[in-house]
């Protein structure tokens, strides 16, 4: 695990109320929706432990990195901080019950190691779930300390996808993965919808008219 740990600045004063026609300020419930629902894996007291996590994002291209936000009160937090490793597993929509359970039961009181068939890739302390069609193992690169959570930024060292979920280009096929999505604050699980466009492609006609580079 890298030694660089950063601390966020103290929060500033709340903004003054402001009226904008046709808009309602929904803060502090301004969650990004929808979010991919995952199961983060770690090793704790010599056994695999799992926790439902949806607060995650890709944060760097090369080397590839993922960031996950874990509350410091959670049992998994201490395990990840100690080992410097974790996994991110993507359950299917058929796994809503067991996925939800991993977020309700604390590893401090319940042994969750028998919930899944576990395997390991390159890292010893990043248990992967065979029932999940996609599992990513990460080594902690940076830990950002926030008021209640730690944002663990992990460098991806392995990404293991079920063979029948890989497309012709060698990439995971979202339709075959059948991932779970989470919305907040209504706290509901969803399935993925239809394709509506192609990224870095559909806007090219407008860029050609306006000129200039991407970004």
Image (cartoon, rainbow, N blue to C red):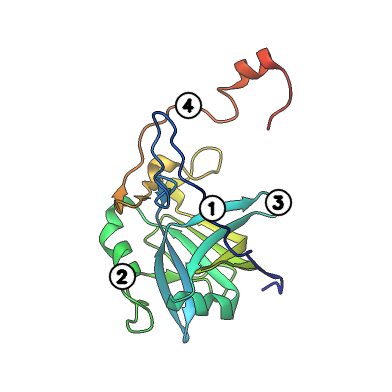
Which residue is painted at 62% across and 52% down in the image?
A: 59
- Residue 62 in the figure: left or right of residue 120: right
- Residue 142 in the figure: left or right of residue 21: right
Which residue is painted at 28% across and 53% down in the image?
A: 94
- Find the distance from the CA under tag 2 to the CA under tag 3: 35 Å
Q: Which mark is residue 57?
A: 1
Which element is circle 3 on? loop
Between disc 2 and disc 1, whose residue precedes?
A: 1
Which residue is painted at 46% across and 50% down in the image?
A: 163
- Find the distance from the CA under tag 2 to the CA under tag 1: 22 Å
Question: 137 or 205: nearer the eye?
Answer: 205
Q: Nearer the viewer, mark 2 or mark 4?
A: 2
- Find the distance from the CA under tag 2 to the CA under tag 4: 36 Å
Which element is circle 4 on? loop
Q: Nearer the viewer, mark 2 or mark 3?
A: 2
The quarter of the picture where residue 85 lies is bottom right
Crowd rating for badge 1 (residues with CA inside 10 Å; few <14, some 14–19, many 20+): some
Up-down relation of residue 147 to residue 134 (above or below): below
Between disc 3 and disc 4, whose residue precedes?
A: 3
Crowd rating for badge 4 (residues with CA inside 10 Å; few <14, some 14–19, many 20+): few
Q: Nearer the viewer, mark 4 or mark 1?
A: 1
- Residue at numbered disc 4: 197
Please report contact status of discs 2 and 1: CB closer than 8 Å, yes or no: no
- Residue at numbered disc 2: 104
Which element is circle 2 on? helix
- Residue at numbered disc 3: 62
């Amino acid at each position: 695990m890298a030694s660089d740990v950063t601390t966020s600045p103290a929060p500033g004063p709340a903004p003054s109320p402001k009226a904008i026609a046709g808009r309602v300020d929904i803060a502090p419930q301004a969650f990004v929706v929808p979010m991919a629902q995952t199961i983060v894996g770690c090793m704790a007291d010599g056994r695999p432990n799992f926790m439902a996590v949806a607060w995650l994002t890709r944060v760097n291209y090369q080397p590839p990195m993922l960031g996950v936000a874990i509350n410091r009160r959670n049992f998994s937090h201490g395990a990840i901080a100690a080992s410097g490793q974790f996994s991110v597993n993507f359950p299917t929509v058929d796994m809503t019950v067991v996925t939800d359970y991993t977020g309700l039961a604390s590893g401090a009181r319940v042994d969750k190691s028998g919930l899944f068939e576990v395997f390991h890739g390159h890292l010893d302390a990043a248990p992967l779930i065979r029932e999940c069609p996609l599992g990513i193992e990460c080594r902690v690169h940076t830990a950002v300390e926030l008021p209640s959570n730690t944002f663990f930024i992990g460098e991806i060292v392995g990404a293991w996808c079920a063979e029948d979920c890989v497309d012709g280009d060698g990439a995971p096929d979202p339709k075959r993965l059948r991932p779970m999505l989470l919305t907040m604050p209504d706290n509901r699980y969803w399935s993925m919808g239809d394709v509506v466009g192609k990224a870095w492609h559909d806007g090219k006609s407008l860029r050609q008219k306006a000129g200039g580079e991407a970004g």
